[in-house]
Image: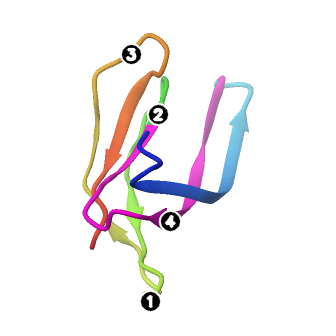
Amino acid sequence: ARPDEVRVTALDLDLAVSFADRTISGSVTHHLERTDPAAPLVLDTRDLQIDRVEVRLPESSSWQPATFALGGAHPILGRPLTIDLPP
């Protein structure tokens, strides 16, 4: 994570738990504060399957697909999720 460039100020989490399948699925909406408008959002993850990432600018009412990538695994931090944000 790089909170000096893009910081998560709040999040909304919506999860569904399936005890039969032993899975948790859902979505999260991150509210951000950007100090570097060119920087991507970098989050630490562990053992997640990420199907898609979308972004919405404050002045827009629609969500748009975002480019994202999972980096290599780290034994403590997991894998970095890097999300390209629009300017």
Q: Mark 2 highlights which residue? A: 44
* Mark sitting on residue 74: 3
Q: Mark 1 highlights which residue? A: 59
Image position of 6 with respect to 79: above or below: below
Report how far apart the C-alphas of labels 3 and 1 lie in the structure: 36 Å
Q: Mark 4 highlights which residue? A: 33
- Contact flag, marks 4 and 3 (Cβ < 8 Å): no
Under mark 1, the amino acid is Glu
Nearest to N terminus: mark 2 or mark 1: 2
Report how far apart the C-alphas of labels 4 and 2 lie in the structure: 17 Å
- What SS does tag 2 mark? strand
Badge 4: residue crowd in 10 Å (few <14, some 14–19, many ≥20): some
The image's colour scheme reads rainbow
Nearest to N terminus: mark 4 or mark 2: 4
Residue 22 sits in quarter: top right
Nearest to N terminus: mark 1 or mark 4: 4
Image position of 39 with respect to 37: above or below: above
Report how far apart the C-alphas of labels 3 and 2 lie in the structure: 10 Å
Residue 51 sits in quarter: top left
Placement of the N terminus among the 4 image quadrants: top left
- What SS does tag 1 mark? loop
Under mark 3, the amino acid is His
Under mark 4, the amino acid is Glu
Residues 46 and 24: in front is 46
Q: Residue at x 49, y 14 (%)?
A: 76
Q: Position of residue 26 (x, y in %)?
A: 60, 48
Answer whether residue 80 is magenta in the image. Answer: no
